[in-house]
Image: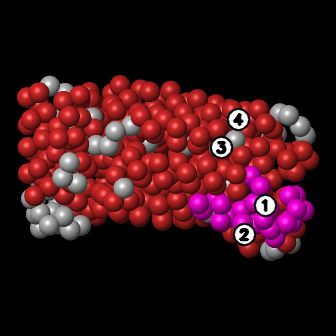
Amino acid sequence: MFGYDTAVISGAVSSIDANFINPIHLSETAKNALSGWTVSSALLGCIVGAAAAGWIARALGRRGGLILAAIFFFLSAIGSAVPEVGFGPIGGMGPHALPAFIAYRILCGVGIGIASMLSPLYIAEIAPSRIRGRLVSYNQMAIVTGILLVYFVNWAIAAQGDTAWLRTTGWRFMLGSEVVPATFFLLLLRFVPDTPRWLVIKGRAEEAKAILLRLTTVSEAEVTYREIEVSLAQTSGKLFSFGAGVVVIGILLSAFQQLVGINAVLYYAPTMFQNMGAGANAALLQTVLVGAVNMLCTLIAIFTVDRWGRKPLLIFGGLIMAIAMLTLGALFAAGSTGIYALIAILLYIGGFALSWGPVVWVLLAEMFPNAIKDKAMAVAVAAQWITNLLVSWSFRIVDGSSALNAIFHHGLAYFLYGAMSLLAVLFVWRWIPETKEKRLEEIAQFWQRGNDVPQARTP
């Protein structure tokens, strides 16, 4: 649902512009800003959902929070497909339906924000330490599977008619298709137990022990249970109980995951390929190729994250992304956007999927001590969505500027993302500790109370 609902908008960008934006007859800058806000409005909901997810995780449980997210997914799918319902005739309101459309996309974003924090948190809290990196990486695999699936769905829907049909009807089927995975998500959550750590927080010790015994050996279950009790009693549970360093580093890690430009590429992939000269259908088909590479390289990450470690993957992937984005910016600036530009895009996607896509979620789920995990992770994930909103919104403005394009030919954004990829590599090399094969309770020892730096920085 995270991946599907995030990327579904990519197939509907031109239709949204045609139905809601163009009839208003705004200036170029205002038009690009409104279009960018409409496409990225779900990210405002993501910020709200992620920020509230810490409280939701503690009050309703990890499972209860995911059920709430599923309900939001379902309702927003219907509303964004037919935003006129309750306000006027379907297809007859034009730009007047835009506020309702944005409201439903924001509701969808709240669901994404909740799920984006609770899913890796749930997996990390229930997974044995020896395979935790791989299992949390499955979360990213699910995200990219959703992205690839919706690219196929968008392409298949667009193939059912011409451009006029797509702009009147097809885009509604794209957004309405979210109902199907939302329904499955809600139904399957019935079979999911809550995590031992949350059950201990709520004083439900026997249930926690029973789940631990299902997950591991008797001796390891006893050790883990005692460590959970100790870790939860260590501090008051206030956000900065272990100093500001761990929280700030988590926020910066989240921010860099977005500053490298990944979601600008994913949201606007068809637009990007059209800038390279592809037709509408060809652009959607090339977008499917992006999704396929994303999935393949995420699979590689799943099988390497517990072998190579988190830190080496982030550095290696960051260097790949930097080379690819700087190359792509140079190709656009030179007006040479053929097969080499496509290769650069696929290389960038591969580098991200191998590293910053899955590994950041692994680290965020691992790095915070138990006593502050839900609060700190909520803050870090909210920061990620704030950065995502800024990057996605600004891409539309930068890429649509005639003045900038006269100089860079749509290449400026990619130069910026390449520079950010290099900064991300330096940040990881200097500040991120290695967490491979350590129990969640052990990882808390990386952070010395009152200090602003981790005790261990080597991979």
Name the spot of residue 264 as percent of width and height, x first. Answer: 59, 52
Task: Identify the residue at horizontal 38%, vertical 29% (top origin).
Answer: 302
Name the spot of residue 438 as percent of width and height, x first. Answer: 17, 38
Look at discs 2 and 3 and give the one toward the viewer.
3
Q: State which region is magenta.
A: 80-107
Q: Cα distance, mark 1 to mark 2?
A: 12 Å
Q: Which mark is residue 153?
A: 4
Name the spot of residue 373 as percent of width and height, x first. Answer: 26, 55
Label 3 environment density (alpha carbons within 10 Å; few <14, some 14–19, many ≥20): some
Mark 3 vs mark 1: which is more N-terminal?
1
Residue that numbered label 1 is attached to:
85
Q: Cα distance, mark 3 to mark 1?
A: 16 Å
| Proximity of marks 4 and 2: CB atoms separated by less than 8 Å | no
Secondary element type, mark 2: helix
Q: Which residue type carries mark 1?
A: Val
Task: Identify the residue at horizontal 14%, vertical 55% (top origin).
Answer: 232
Look at discs 4 and 1 and give the one toward the viewer.
1
